[in-house]
Image: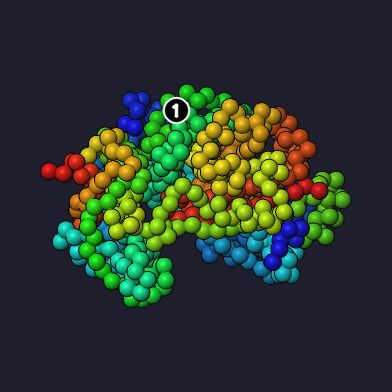
Amino acid sequence: MNLNGSACIVGAYEHPTRKADALSVVRLHADVAKGALADAGLSKSDIDGYFCAGDAPGLGANTVAEYLGLKLRHVDSTECGGSAPILHVAHAAEAIAAGRCNVALITLAGRPRAQMAAVQAAAKEGKSGKAPLALKPPDPDAPELAFELPYGPTTQNLYAAVAKRHMFEFGTTSEQLAWIKVAASHHAQHNPHAMLRDVVTLADVVNSPMVSDPLHRLDCCVMSDGGGALIVARPEIARELARKSGRPLVMVRGTGEAPKHGMGGKMDLTYSAAAWSGPMAFAEAGITPADIQYASLYDSFTITVLMQLEDLGFCKKGEGGRFVMDGNLISGVGRLPFNTDGGGLCNNHPANRGGVTKVIEAVRQLRGEAHPAVQVPNCHLALASGIGGALASRHTAATLILESI
Amino acid sequence: MSPPETSPKPSADKPQRPPAGPRKIPAPRVLPETQTYWTAADEGRLMVKRCAACGEFHHYPRDICPHCLSADTEWLPAAGTGTVYSFSTMGQGEAAYTMAFVTLDEGVTMMTNLVDCDPAAVVIGQKVRVVFKPSEGGHAVPMFTPEEASS
């Protein structure tokens, strides 16, 4: 099924909170759903499809649908970590094209930062708490568990191993990775909601404490609470809404998704699954990476961005380090403005999952609603890319190409 | 690549934790199809799976070959030597540990730890050999150490 032109994003909303001490996970899902409906100019009864991933509490889609009182005829709770909302846009477009729904709501939300604070406070009092960093507690039935858990894999060292191999293969340096954080910080200074608004230098990044070598603290994303929601609608509905609001249509042009894993031990950490999802999306959209005016790139770590730049074809494999130098990712300065909200590196990484904010900022750019200091002039073609899971073990890439009309 | 001298700044968000001791190695949760691997590990032997139908080695070990889906897979003793594919050291002081990927001489790459060495002196491509470390109340776990560091 070709999804080019099959659906539009008509609503997008990012929760303003970054620490949700008094808001439950389901309340955050509800808040962002309400925000996206208001943004779209739709009401609850218009929603007939709902999409969420593993961050939704309880029985997932059903629990959130119950809380919100949704009457649905299509649900999809495809779980692939942080890239899920990007993949959900494609799945919503599929469902709309297949006649299974007309207006699809996608939500992502969580409160790992508040949970972490609570765990640390409990630890001070000698009580133990549940660690909030993992997506889910280890599943004893997972066949890889015995061959990984004894070795202490973490999100940080699994991405660091990819960075170290990239440095070995291609001569990439810590200073080159630092350029990615520097660019994100240049954008974050204009976002009043961003957790880290100070512009940082290369020296700030490479002199920040080592977290898991070669990744420093400032190579890592923030940990934040909050979330975001999207509403995907049939083009006829989107045209009617655009007529009323005077906003451009944001049309789905290209989609791709692909998982990558240990491949039975035939490991190659020099590329990510974006090398598979990207070409699918570009083929469907009928454009090339050179046509993209703005890119939201998943930035759990600086190396995550570097890998996607290469794997999506913005530069050749191995040349990502040189590509990101000299502010090439800074809006108004470089060739490829990225993550103009400050991204996960500076702004927001709600529920330890960055996918929804990637699509939201792409929608802002395509509507001309990004901050004026970072708005890409006449931005018509944008890309959102996500990596969910861990680069070095198993992850799912999702690529989405959007056009404003 | 050694940890920096600067210590993390305390903040309201991140209270200082007491110094951690050496990382405890969680016991592997063993599924029936890999019991042979862990029994051998307790005896100091590293096993690897090969498919009798397509001839390919694979890791992590499973009943069904991930390359051709044949159920005709067999356990073979691995040479116990390989090369470092990549690695990263995390943590401070005695809690520091090095997660690594090692490519066995049989051709498969496995997650492991580099132990009994200074990880700052390790380089990608370096030859390593297996050693077995006790886990917390469970089977021994294969880890790797530089060939040069062997005694």
Q: Secondary structure at mark 1?
A: helix
Q: Position of residue A162 (x, y in %)?
A: 43, 44
- Residue closest to the far front: B55
Q: Residue at x 54, y 38 (%)?
A: A320
Residue A257 image point, x, y percent: 59, 58
The residue type indicated by label 1 comes to Val
Q: Nearer the viewer, residue A48 or A6?
A: A6
* Quadrant in the picture for residue B3: top left
Q: At which x and y percent is residue A394? A: 45, 55
Q: Is residue A230 left or right of residue A305?
A: right
Say if A197 sits above or below A313 in the image: above
Q: Is residue A7 left or right of residue A229?
A: right
Q: Position of residue A283 (x, y in %)?
A: 67, 56
Q: Is residue A394 above or below residue A376?
A: below
Chain containing mark 1: A
Q: Where the N terminus of chain A falls, by quadrant? A: bottom right
Residue drawn 52% across the image and 35% down it: A321
Furthest residue to the left? B151
In the rendered view, how is the structure colored? rainbow
Name the residue: 71% across, 63% down: A2
Residue position marked by numbered label 1 in the rendering:
A206
Q: Is residue A32 visible?
A: no
Whether residue B85 sits left or right of residue A232 in the image: it is: left
Quadrant position of residue B45: bottom left
Mark 1 crowdedness (10 Å alpha carbons): few <14, some 14-19, many ≥20 = many
Q: Where A58 sits versus B84, above or below?
A: below
Q: Quadrant of residue A20?
A: top right
- Point 61% across, 52% down: residue: A278
Q: How many marks?
A: 1
> Farthest residue toward the bottom?
B71
Looking at the image, is A163 positioned above or below residue A83? above
Res. A352 in view:
yes
